[in-house]
Image (cartoon, coloured by chain):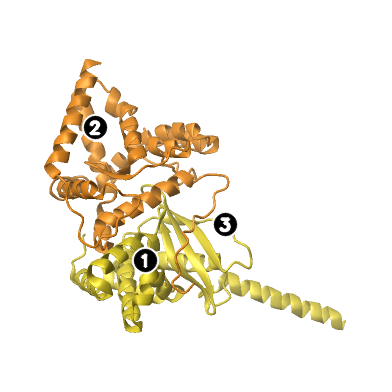
């Protein structure tokens, strides 16, 4: 009788655990990478589609959404570090912090612009191909809608605070890879300080620019 | 036959004139040369020519197109040419030894041409038949032809030596471009296709301008990566292509 109770409570905890991973609204440290991406993307898409302000092209509102719902699951410092390559070590800690912030803002702004154009698109999530002890995985998705399907992959790394996205592949192009030469060129032309200034100026310019539509 | 030769000769002269008039722009000081782009000075000048053409001719025309025609009409135009291209995609997938993709694309054409009113509506995509896009350059790549150095073509934009041959073959084998006898019709259709193609990335183009630090090298690096990805996709041993980054701390 006692053992039956034990099994019963064991089963119950199991069920509760299962339920919490399936129905949880916000991912936590133990959320697997593919589930994390699915939760975040589903949530953000639902919000974008149901918000009339965003549909009209209210970019500050999208930026706010991205800051709250996507940025916590990214590691922008690592993104910047990878895009900088060997130049990263030449930057002072303050410059590293500035670069991370400015690059983050540039990416958020670009991403928000793309999000605000979402209408009737749907996202297809591909099965995760990874070993259980992998420290790095690629979660593959495809955005379907008008026009050609857009493959969108996320590269995640396991950290102490859960899985974090640090690179994205859009239609076959890795973000970090696409910025590596641009960063290196800007640095060899104007130094690290020049790159910081370039990013600051660009972000200011984008923040004041009128939306295209 | 003679006519065809004349057309090609005229094209060659035109390209030569453009190459001469744009000259060789120098690379901005401090730019690190990419091993895949030995012709960067020439490429940069053609890139500038294309940018000017886009800003002063193509983009304004597309803006007018968007202003005049309602969205459902533009979507119909897009779907029509997309369906037409699917015929070629199906053939290319067959040539690349991907019969399952080829069958999928063939079914797309059947569904969209019949139930989709001659291709004006894309019913295949919501029906679960995924769209692919293949061309001669990709097919040559799958066959093992190396890409060769990066080239920027006037009008066509980013390319490489292999894809330049691919683009010529695409045009030569294109029914609407090479086999339609009525010249007026052919030119109108070609014009509409160009406008339609530019229209599909009307908004994305502005985003790219905002995100780029140096648009030339951004587009080059993106093009080289994207072509490699397209050639690799759909293979049995398809692995997520993960670039190995130099970690400054390792």
Quarter the C terminus of chain A occupies: bottom left
Whether residues under marks 3 and 2 lie with C-beta atoms below 8 angstroms apart, the answer is: no
Mark-to-mark CA distance, 1 and 3: 25 Å
Q: Secondary structure at mark 3?
A: loop
Secondary element type, mark 1: helix
Would residue A179 appear left or right of B54 to someone viewing this image? right
Q: In percent of the image, x 41 and y 32: which residue is there?
A: B87
Tell me, by letter, which chain the rendering colours yellow: A
Say yes or no: labels 1 and 3 on the same chain: yes
Quadrant containing the N terminus of chain A is bottom right
Helix, strand, or loop for circle 2? helix
Task: List x then y, in percent, for residue B99.
Answer: 54, 34
- Check if mark 1's residue and mark 3's residue have beta carbons within 8 Å: no
Chain letter, disc 2 residue: B
For mark 3, does the 10 Å Cα neighbourhood hold few (<14), some (14 to 19), or many (20 or more) residues?
few
Colour-to-chain, orange? B
Image mark 1: chain: A
- Cα separation between marks 3 and 2: 41 Å
Q: Nearer the viewer, mark 2 or mark 1?
A: 2
Q: In the rendered image, which residue does mark 3 sit on?
A: A127
Within-10-Å neighbours for mark 2: few <14, some 14–19, many 20+: some
Image quadrant where residue B156 sits: top left
Q: State the mark number for residue A48.
A: 1
> In front: B110, or B86?
B86
Position of residue B177 measured from the top left corner of the image (x, y, whole percent): 27, 28
Chain letter, disc 3 residue: A
On screen, A75 above or below B229? below
Point 48% across, 57% down: residue: A141
Have a look at marks 3 and 2 and say if they share a chain: no
Image coords of residue A202 (percent x, y):
22, 69
Q: Residue at x 45, y 47 (%)?
A: B126
């Amino acid at each position: 009788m006692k053992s039956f109770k034990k099994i019963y409570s064991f089963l119950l905890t199991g069920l509760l655990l299962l339920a919490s991973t399936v129905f949880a609204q916000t991912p936590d440290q133990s959320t697997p990478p593919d589930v994390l991406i699915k939760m975040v993307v589903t949530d953000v898409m639902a919000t974008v589609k149901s918000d009339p302000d965003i549909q009209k092209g209210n970019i500050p509102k999208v930026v706010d959404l991205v800051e709250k719902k996507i940025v916590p699951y990214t590691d922008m410092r690592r993104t910047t570090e990878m895009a900088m390559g060997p130049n990263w070590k030449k930057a002072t800690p303050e410059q590293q912090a500035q670069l991370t912030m400015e690059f983050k803002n540039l990416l958020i702004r670009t991403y928000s612009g793309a999000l605000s154009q979402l209408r009737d698109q749907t996202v297809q999530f591909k099965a995760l191909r990874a070993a259980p002890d992998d420290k790095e995985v690629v979660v593959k998705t495809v955005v379907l809608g008008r026009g050609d399907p857009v493959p969108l992959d996320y590269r995640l790394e396991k950290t102490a605070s859960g899985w974090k996205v640090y690179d994205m592949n859009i239609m076959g192009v890795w973000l970090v890879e696409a910025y590596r030469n641009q960063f290196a060129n800007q640095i060899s032309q104007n130094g690290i300080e020049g790159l910081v200034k370039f990013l600051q100026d660009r972000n200011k310019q984008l923040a004041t620019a009128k939306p295209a539509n | 036959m003679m006519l065809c030769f004349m057309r090609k000769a005229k094209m060659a002269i035109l390209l030569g004139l453009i190459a001469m008039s744009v000259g060789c722009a120098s690379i901005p000081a401090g730019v690190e040369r990419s091993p895949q782009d030995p012709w960067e000075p020439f490429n940069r000048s053609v890139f500038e020519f294309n940018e000017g053409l886009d800003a002063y001719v193509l983009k304004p025309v597309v803006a007018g197109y968007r202003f005049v025609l309602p969205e459902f009409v533009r979507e119909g135009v897009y779907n029509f040419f997309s369906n037409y291209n699917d015929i070629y995609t199906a053939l290319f997938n067959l040539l690349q030894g991907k019969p399952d993709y080829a069958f999928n694309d063939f079914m797309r054409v059947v569904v969209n041409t019949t139930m989709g009113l001659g291709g004006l509506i894309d019913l295949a995509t919501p029906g679960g038949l995924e769209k692919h896009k293949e061309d001669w350059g990709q097919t040559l790549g799958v066959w093992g032809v190396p890409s060769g150095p990066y080239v920027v073509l006037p009008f066509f934009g980013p390319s490489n030596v292999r894809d330049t041959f691919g683009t010529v073959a695409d045009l030569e084998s294109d029914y609407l471009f090479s086999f339609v006898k009525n010249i007026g019709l052919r030119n109108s259709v070609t014009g509409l296709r160009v406008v339609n193609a530019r229209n599909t990335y009307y908004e994305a183009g502005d985003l790219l301008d905002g995100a780029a630090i140096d648009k030339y090298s951004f587009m080059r690096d993106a093009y080289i990566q994207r072509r490699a990805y397209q050639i690799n996709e759909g293979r049995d041993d398809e692995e997520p292509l993960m670039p190995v980054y130099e970690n400054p701390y390792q």
